[in-house]
């Protein structure tokens, strides 16, 4: 069995202890931090496979941690948020988080969500051995890389998974629900609208003009498709 590592960041010591227990029961190697600066130090030292990150933290908050982590690495991030507010979730996703869980939650759900993120990241890296070129974008499925005009683009595992789906069949329209099912392995209430946040991130990274996208096109009332440029193996 593959052994993963997780860094759990929350200022609630009882909660982090509970999550640590559940993750370790599932074979994870864990590290725990209770404030922002401590969390960044631990993440840089341990380089975990996944980060479980609360948004409301002393020191530096979860949003800033997410921003800093994304500047340095593509480690998957599962957000923990105490408020069921769409704005919080969208801000976190736009900063590069891969998924979120709203408190109160079941520790089993947190572990299950983490496993799904890691599983889809692993599948994305192994799904194809070839690269494709569409316009000024080069996508290497084996290396989990996207390059624009030859320069490496920093994308999260979730963002790459969306690109993988859309570029496999350029021109085909995918609904938000279809995208959710593909990137999550299962769908759950409230997530469809967060797809828009991931799309916004991808347009900012891949498009010359995100306000007039040439690649990721909105088909109003239906979903999204990938267009523009020839697809070369």
Image (spheres, rainbow, N blue to C red):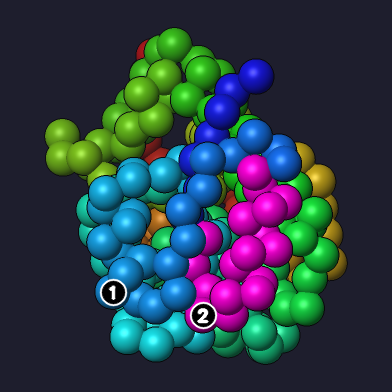
Q: Give the residues in magenta.
A: 8-24
Above or below: residue 202 compared with residue 117:
below
Q: Secondary structure at mark 2?
A: loop
Q: Is residue 19 magenta?
A: yes
Task: Judge the density around disc 1: few (<14), some (14-19), many (≥20) Cα neighbours within 10 Å.
Answer: some
Q: Secondary structure at mark 1?
A: helix
Q: Which residue is mark 2?
A: 11
Q: Nearer the viewer, residue 83 or 227?
A: 83
- Dividing the picture into quadrants, the one containing residue 229 is top left
- Dividing the picture into quadrants, the one containing residue 224 is bottom right
Q: Nearer the viewer, residue 219 or 77?
A: 77
Q: Is residue 231 magenta?
A: no
| Residue 179 spot, x, y in % from top left | 69, 48
Q: Nearer the viewer, residue 113 or 200?
A: 113
Q: Nearer the viewer, residue 137 or 171?
A: 137
Which residue shows up at 41% across the image and 44% down it?
48
Residue 176 in sight in this render: no
In the rendered image, the residue lying farthest to the left is 150
Above or below: residue 77 compared with residue 93:
above
Which residue shows up at 44% across the image and 11% down it?
129
* Secondary structure character of the magenta stretch overall: helix
Give the position of the N terminus as an image quadrant.
Answer: top right
How far apart marks 2 and 1 lie (CA) works out to: 12 Å
Q: Which residue is mark 1?
A: 37
């Amino acid at each position: 069995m593959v052994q993963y590592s997780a860094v759990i960041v929350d200022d609630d010591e009882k909660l982090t202890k509970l999550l640590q227990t559940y993750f370790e029961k599932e074979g994870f190697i864990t590290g725990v931090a209770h404030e922002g600066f401590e969390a960044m130090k631990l993440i840089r030292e341990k380089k975990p496979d996944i980060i479980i990150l609360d948004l409301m933290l002393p020191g530096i908050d979860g949003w800033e941690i997410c921003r800093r982590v994304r500047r340095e690495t593509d480690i998957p991030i599962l957000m923990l948020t105490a408020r069921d507010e769409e704005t919080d979730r969208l801000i976190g996703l736009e900063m590069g988080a891969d998924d979120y869980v709203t408190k109160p939650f079941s520790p089993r759900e947190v572990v299950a969500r983490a496993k799904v993120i890691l599983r889809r990241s692993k599948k994305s890296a192994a799904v194809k051995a070839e690269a494709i070129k569409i316009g000024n974008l080069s996508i290497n499925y084996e290396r989990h890389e996207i390059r624009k005009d030859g320069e490496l683009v920093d994308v999260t595992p979730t963002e790459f998974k969306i690109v993988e789906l859309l570029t496999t069949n350029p021109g085909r329209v995918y609904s938000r629900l279809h995208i959710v099912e593909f990137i999550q392995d299962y769908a759950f209430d409230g997530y469809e609208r967060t797809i828009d946040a991931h799309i916004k991130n991808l347009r900012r990274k891949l498009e010359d003009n995100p306000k007039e996208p040439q690649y990721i096109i909105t088909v109003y009332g239906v979903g999204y498709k990938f267009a523009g440029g020839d697809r070369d193996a």
